[in-house]
Image (cartoon, helix red, strand yellow):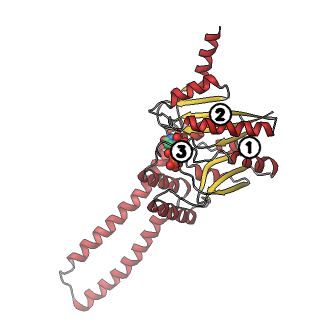
């Protein structure tokens, strides 16, 4: 028997959960009729939803013993959700996918084939279009991938998503990265292995709304830069060197000017400009240092990545007691 775990992070997904459950059921029975040795578990992560997501998960776990769930004590973010899923999944193969059907379940059988028959360690999808997304958002995304891949040793693939089918070996490698500031796009790529990209057109969310505002995405991309590149630190030194060079030339010019034309009291605006410019530069560089320092600070605290307040075990226990 081979077990496939399907991890689904959910944050306020009451509208799409029933749809998702229906779709995934179909895929599971399809795969099981083709491969008799396959078993499945559905591991939902309730990331502190404020709607009825948890109630629905309890119901599902009651009626279907393949359904498991972990409910967080508050919203910890999708990264924490994925980590919790990977940590608790028992499968020989693990799938991570969104609840909103933007990651079409129909790809799972194809991914299974790539991994089991063609020797890949991971199969994932790559959006080749960003249909249904605003122009500005796509533009920023494009720029982000350009900059990121210039300054980071880890390749971040444009359009790559968190929809992944992985072997146990790859999952264990990802889990061995214990960092608190998790940027999955980087982590998936950093661990390496043989990855198959399946290209497809972007699909819009089946129902509900996205939790990602533009601002959140922007912060997330900075997160990625600070987690997977130290180039901003080098930028500080570079700016320092440049400004030293400029001032060196400037000093020589001023000395010569003073020697030739004598001393005068003009130049107040120049001094003010220089002070403001250098001051700004220094604050900017201190800010960059601060970013890395704060990340290090959070890492050294060694706080847990997530806290669970309830799992499917409580539902199972109740069921057992009722049966007694
Ligand atoms: N999600 C989560 N925690 C969060 C935000 C999102 O677990 O704080 C889940 C969400 O339920 C969904 C997936 O992450 O299953 C992707 O979220 P969303 O569809 O809002 O993002 P988008 O597809 O717009 O990038
Ligand atoms: Mg989505």
- CA gap, disc 2 to disc 3? 19 Å
- Closer to the chain start, of discs 2 and 3, is 2
Q: Residue at x 68, y 46 (%)?
A: 106
Query: Which element is circle 3 on?
Result: loop
- CA gap, disc 1 to disc 2? 20 Å
* Residue that sits furthest to the bottom in the current view: 260
Of 197 and 235, the residue lying toward us: 197
The mark lying in front, picked from 2 and 3, is: 3
Q: Label for residue 169?
A: 1
Of 208 and 9, the residue lying toward us: 208
Of 138 and 282, the residue lying toward us: 138
Q: Label for residue 206?
A: 3
* Residue that sits furthest to the left in the current view: 265
Query: Is the residue 323 above or below the residue 170 in the image?
Result: above
Number of residues whose C-alpha sits closer than 10 Å to that of mark 2, classed few (under 14), some (14–19) or many (20 or more): many
Q: Residue 85: x percent and y percent? A: 61, 37
Query: Is the residue 199 above or below the residue 169 in the image?
Result: below
- CA gap, disc 1 to disc 3? 32 Å
Q: Residue 263: x percent and y percent? A: 20, 85
Query: Is the residue 285 above or below the residue 310 in the image?
Result: below
- Relative horizontal placement of residue 25, taking residue 56 as reference (left or right): right
Quadrant of the image for the C terminus? top right
Quadrant of the image for the N terminus? top right
Q: Which residue is mark 2?
A: 42
- Relative horizontal placement of residue 32, taking residue 279 as reference (left or right): right
- Closer to the chain start, of discs 1 and 2, is 2
The mark lying in front, picked from 1 and 3, is: 3
User: Would you identify the image quadrant in which residue 33 lies?
Assistant: top right
Number of residues whose C-alpha sits closer than 10 Å to that of mark 3, classed few (under 14), some (14–19) or many (20 or more): some
Query: Which element is circle 1 on?
Result: helix
């Amino acid at each position: 028997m081979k077990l496939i775990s399907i991890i689904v992070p959910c944050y306020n997904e009451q509208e799409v959960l029933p749809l998702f459950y229906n779709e995934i059921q179909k895929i599971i029975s399809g795969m099981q009729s083709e491969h008799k040795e396959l078993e499945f578990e559905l591991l939902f992560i309730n990331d502190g939803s404020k709607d009825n997501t948890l109630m629905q998960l309890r119901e599902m776990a009651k009626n279907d013993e393949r359904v498991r769930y972990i409910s967080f004590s508050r919203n910890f973010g999708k990264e924490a959700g994925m980590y919790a899923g990977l940590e608790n999944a028992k499968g020989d193969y693990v799938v991570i996918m969104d609840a909103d059907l933007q990651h079409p379940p129909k790809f799972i059988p194809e991914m299974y084939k790539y991994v089991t028959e063609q020797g890949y360690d991971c199969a994932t999808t790559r959006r080749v279009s960003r249909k249904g997304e605003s122009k500005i958002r796509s533009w920023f995304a494009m720029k982000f991938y350009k900059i990121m891949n210039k300054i980071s040793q880890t390749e971040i693939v444009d359009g790559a998503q968190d929809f992944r089918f992985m072997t146990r070996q790859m999952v264990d490698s990802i889990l061995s990265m214990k960092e608190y500031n998790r940027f999955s796009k980087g982590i998936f790529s950093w661990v390496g292995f043989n990855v198959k990209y399946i290209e497809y057109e972007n699909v819009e969310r089946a129902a509900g709304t996205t939790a990602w505002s533009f601002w959140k995405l922007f912060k997330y991309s900075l997160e990625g830069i600070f987690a997977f590149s130290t180039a901003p630190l080098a930028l500080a030194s570079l700016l320092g060197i440049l400004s030293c060079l400029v001032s060196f030339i400037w000093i020589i010019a001023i000395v010569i000017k003073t020697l030739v034309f004598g001393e005068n009291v003009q130049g107040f605006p120049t001094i003010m400009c220089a002070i403001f410019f250098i001051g700004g530069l220094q604050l900017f560089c201190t800010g960059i240092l601060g970013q890395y320092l704060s990340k290090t600070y959070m890492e050294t605290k060694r706080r847990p990545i997530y806290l669970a307040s309830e799992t499917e075990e409580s539902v199972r226990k109740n069921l057992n007691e009722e049966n007694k």
